[in-house]
Amino acid sequence: MARLSEVLKTMSYSEIARRTGTTPGYISLLFRGKRSTKLETLGKLSKALGVGVEELHGYLTRISYRNPSGKSRKPSDTPRRRKRSTAPVAA
């Protein structure tokens, strides 16, 4: 994992996007855990970064399950939206 972290420090999102045929915005969302990616794109990313697919997938999986406080969470710990009440409002 140290190798991937070092590579990410030296390359900009624009450079990664150029090498993979995506946009810097997509790369940003991906590395912040806000988007998932296809296997084909994962392969392009790993080739552009010079790391293994397994290492990159493990990294992206870990960051996608982090909440803003930085603590790990399981997918089942994701907050659920409350349903709106369907009761009529009194005038």
Image (cartoon, helix red, strand yellow):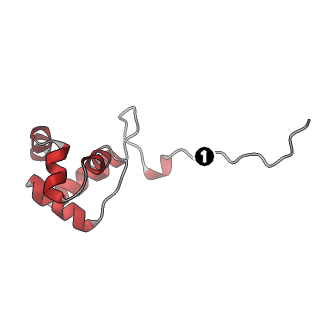
Residue at x 11% of width, y 60% of height: 47
**How many numbered discs sit on the rendered protein?**
1
Q: Position of residue 32 (x, y in %)?
A: 31, 43
Q: Compare residues 71 and 56 and report the one nearer the observer.
A: 56
Is 1 or 81 nearer to us in this picture?
81
| Residue, far bottom | 40
Q: Position of residue 26 (x, y in %)?
A: 30, 51
In this view, the residue farthest toward the top is 69
The crowd level at tag 1 (other Cα within 10 Å; few <14, some 14-19, many 20+) is few
Q: Quadrant of residue 69?
A: top left
Residue 83 vs residue 41, the one in the foreground: 41
The residue beneath circle 1 is 81
Q: Is residue 48 left or right of residue 38?
A: left
Quadrant in which residue 19 is drawn? bottom left
Residue at the image point whose x is 19% and y is 59% from the top: 21
The answer to which quarter of the image holds residue 56 is bottom left
Where does the image place residue 17, in percent across and percent down from the top left? 19, 52
Quadrant of image for the C terminus: top right
In the rendered structure, the answer to whether residue 36 lies left or right of residue 48 reads: right
- Residue sitting at x 13%, y 38%: 9
Which amino acid, by three-letter code, is at mark 1?
Arg
**SS for callout 1:** loop
* Residue at point 23%, 68% (across, down): 40
